[in-house]
RNA sequence: GCGCCCGUAGCUCAGUGGAUAGAGCAUCCGCCUUCUAAGCGGACGGCCGUUGGUUCGAAUCCAACCGGGCGCGCCA
């Protein structure tokens, strides 16, 4: 918000200078004005490098341009010393600004006004988006890689909602086909063995230990009622029963992670004609052909590196054919865009699917596929590959049990999807600054503690007395009514000592940039930015806390700073809400 | 061999064309009579994989190469 205001001031200064012919050959504001935060404090709170960008066109030295622009900024009443306490031109042509208290106070007022909605953006323009993610096979437990996909998708969905998109979340269920038959055959063998009829476990497919406990659940539910079935029926029934137990297990785990899908799309519903339907469309559009006994998609014509099989010579259709049918369904559902999140090991399928969508006559650019890289688990720096319980891969539920939902969400949300994650189990459990997830929550709890201290009766354990609140309910209510009228009441929050003011300013600057962070994160599909942003806010609060007492003898200062603490608490709660990490009142 | 992703401090990572490349951890040194020290401050630490190019300016864009991961099925 502050950046925007400053941007407008610089823009109108440039326009003024251009109009008066002060910028040489420049006849219009041809480059965007970008306000940035300099790294070095001596470069001011905010800076603008637009003069360098105009230099080429103006055929004038950047520093001269910056000076001309400065003259016009000076004459702008909005840029008074209350708002911008100081600004100067620095080589090679930067304009550096020092902020006063005015805009900071305005920002605090705005945060209070918008409350839980502070940071919400309308970049989404209410566009309808379908996000499909996790989409794991119902043939075993979710592992940590699914966890990453799940957390990323969930954060992205929360972020998109906050950024003004109309979002639906869907899980595509591969609940039919070869892998389900495999599951059925293996579960049938285990089922018989567990019911007293020793049966050899079929080779290949899923390791026994990965489905054994699910078969136990099937037995708990159905007892031995499938025992009299023949092989075909047994496999079929056990496949159904086992996959439903597994699906339920996955659903529950996802719920514990704070993930809730609007819809579960079952692949098996596509095999009653929908798949054949897309094959017809391909044929009609002349994008398929028969060869070597199989039916092929002419995907090479459509940008893929090779053609792909739709129906095998054995007669059954491929995964791609079903996926094409699934996407035909998606496109028929009147969305403005589709986001799909896959594990990076599936990236080979992307061109095939895009080609299929194109062959169906849809615009593949409405579909965005985001790939998530692998998660490398470690413990005190040593790599952890095998599950303690299952022996194969580390399951998501094990990690959840060990480190808890909040740490799992934070660490899986924090990095960019295209980077592999190094997830240290010991670090995630630590309750200290080393663990950012904890540190951010601690900052929120600290805000709550300060507010409690000021607004609730205080039990002094040493003197064994109960002291009345520092501020009465009425005083606090009056203050909240006051700041709706004028942001001036926040001005006493700021100290005149420049060193102390610097930390106060830094906190407000961090808070007020939340809407811009939300917008940028949404545009770039990077919810992880917000996780890091949350850390910045927490850090700024801690620094503020060290130098600025909130509860003092001066009521105006106390009220203003309590307002600042409330604003901080609100921003932390809002950003944690997007990441899906809880914001505790006390720790 | 081809395609995608990645290479930044000892470790984990930010940095989507701007000033002297930043955080956290680790190591070392300071700071509690006060709202949560579960904290804060300081020091140490870098040929941004390499080489070219684009331009006023490159960790950032382009090309080639080197190193690592993944994928290249009538599997899903």
Image (cartoon, rainbow, N blue to C red):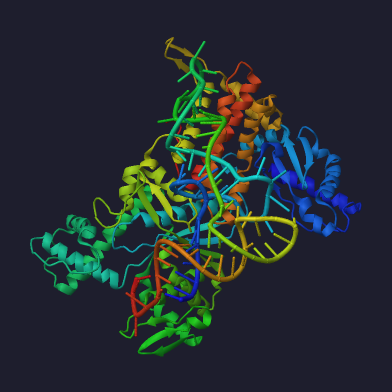
Q: Quadrant of residue A307?
A: bottom left
* Residue A156 placement, left or right of A217: right
Residue situated in front as seen by the camera: A386 or A439: A386
| Residue A145 percent coordinates (x, y) | 38, 57
Residue A163 visible to an observer of this rendering: no
Residue A106, compared with residue A519, is above or below; it is above
Q: Residue furthest top?
A: A463
In the figure, A327 relative to A480: above or below? below
User: Could you tell me residue B29's position as x and y percent?
Assistant: 49, 25
* Quadrant holding the C terminus of chain A: top left
Q: x%, y% of residue A71?
A: 86, 43
The residue lying toward the viewer, choosing from A218 and A190, is A190
Horizontal placement of A114 versus A427: left or right? right
Tell which residue pokes out farthest to the right in this image.
Answer: A20
Residue A192 visible in the snapshot: yes
Q: What quarter of the picture does the N terminus of chain A occupy?
A: top right
Lateral position of residue A528 relative to residue A190, left or right: right
User: Residue A440 or A223: which is nearer the viewer?
Assistant: A440
Residue found at x 40% / y 35%: A431
Image vertical order of residue A382 relative to residue B62, above or below:
above
**Image label count:** 0
Residue at 37 percent across and 39 percent down: it is: A429
Rendered location of residue A507, percent (x, y): 61, 34
**Can you tell which quarter of the image residue A482 is in?**
top right
């Amino acid at each position: 918000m502050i950046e925007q205001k400053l941007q407008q001031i610089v823009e109108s200064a440039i326009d003024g200078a251009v109009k008066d012919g002060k910028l040489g050959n420049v006849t219009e504001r041809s480059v965007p004005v970008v306000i940035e935060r300099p790294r070095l404090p001596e470069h001011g709170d905010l800076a603008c490098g637009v003069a360098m960008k105009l230099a080429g066109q103006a055929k004038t030295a950047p520093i001269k341009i910056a000076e001309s622009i400065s003259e016009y900024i000076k004459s702008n009443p909005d840029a008074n010393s209350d708002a911008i306490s100081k600004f100067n031109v620095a080589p090679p042509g930067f304009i550096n600004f020092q902020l006063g208290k005015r805009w900071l106070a305005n920002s605090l007022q705005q945060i209070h006004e918008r409350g839980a909605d502070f940071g919400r953006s309308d970049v989404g323009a209410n566009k309808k988006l379908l996000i499909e993610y996790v989409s794991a096979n119902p043939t075993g437990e979710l592992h940590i890689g699914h966890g990453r996909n799940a957390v990323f998708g969930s954060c992205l969905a929360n972020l998109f909602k906050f950024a003004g998109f109309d979002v639906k979340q869907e899980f595509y269920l591969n609940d039919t086909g070869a892998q389900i038959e495999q599951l059925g055959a293996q579960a049938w063998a285990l089922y018989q063995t567990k019911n007293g009829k020793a049966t050899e476990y079929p080779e290949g497919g899923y390791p026994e230990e990965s489905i054994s406990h699910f078969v136990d659940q099937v037995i708990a539910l159905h007892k031995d009622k499938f025992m009299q079935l023949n092989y075909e029926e047994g496999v079929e029934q056990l496949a159904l029963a086992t996959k439903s137990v597994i699906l339920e297990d996955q659903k529950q785990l996802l719920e514990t992670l704070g993930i809730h899908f609007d819809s579960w799309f079952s692949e098996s519903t596509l095999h009653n004609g929908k798949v054949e339907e897309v094959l017809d469309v391909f044929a009609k559009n002349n994008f398929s052909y028969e060869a070597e006994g199989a039916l092929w998609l002419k995907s090479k014509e459509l940008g893929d590196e090779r053609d792909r099989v739709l129906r095998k010579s054995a007669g059954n259709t491929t995964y791609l054919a079903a996926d094409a049918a699934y996407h035909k369904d998606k496109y028929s559902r009147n969305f403005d865009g589709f986001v799909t999140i896959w594990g990076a090991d599936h990236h080979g399928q992307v061109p095939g699917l895009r080609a299929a969508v194109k062959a169906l006559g849809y615009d593949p650019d409405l579909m965005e596929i985001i790939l998530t890289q692998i998660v490398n688990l470690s413990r005190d720096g040593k790599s952890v590959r095998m599950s303690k319980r299952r022996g194969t891969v580390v399951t998501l539920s094990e990690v959840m049990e060990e480190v808890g939902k909040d740490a799992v969400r934070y660490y899986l949300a924090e990095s960019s999807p295209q980077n592999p994650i190094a997830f240290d189990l010991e670090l995630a459990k630590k309750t200290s600054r080393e663990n950012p997830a904890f540190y951010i929550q601690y900052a929120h709890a600290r805000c709550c503690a300060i507010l409690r201290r000021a607004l609730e009766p205080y039990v002094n354990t040493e003197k064994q007395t109960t002291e009345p609140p520092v501020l009465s309910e009425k005083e606090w209510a009056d203050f909240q009514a006051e700041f709706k009228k004028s942001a001036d009441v926040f001005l006493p929050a700021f100290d005149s000592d420049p060193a102390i003011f610097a930390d106060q300013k830094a906190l407000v600057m961090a808070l007020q940039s939340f809407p811009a962070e939300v917008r940028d994160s949404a545009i770039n599909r990077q919810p992880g930015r917000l996780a890091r942003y949350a850390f910045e806010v927490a850090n700024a609060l801690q620094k503020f806390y060290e130098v600025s007492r909130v509860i003092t003898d001066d009521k105006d200062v106390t009220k203003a700073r309590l307002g600042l603490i409330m604003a901080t608490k609100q921003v932390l709660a809002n950003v944690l809400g997007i990441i899906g990490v809880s914001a505790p009142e006390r720790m």
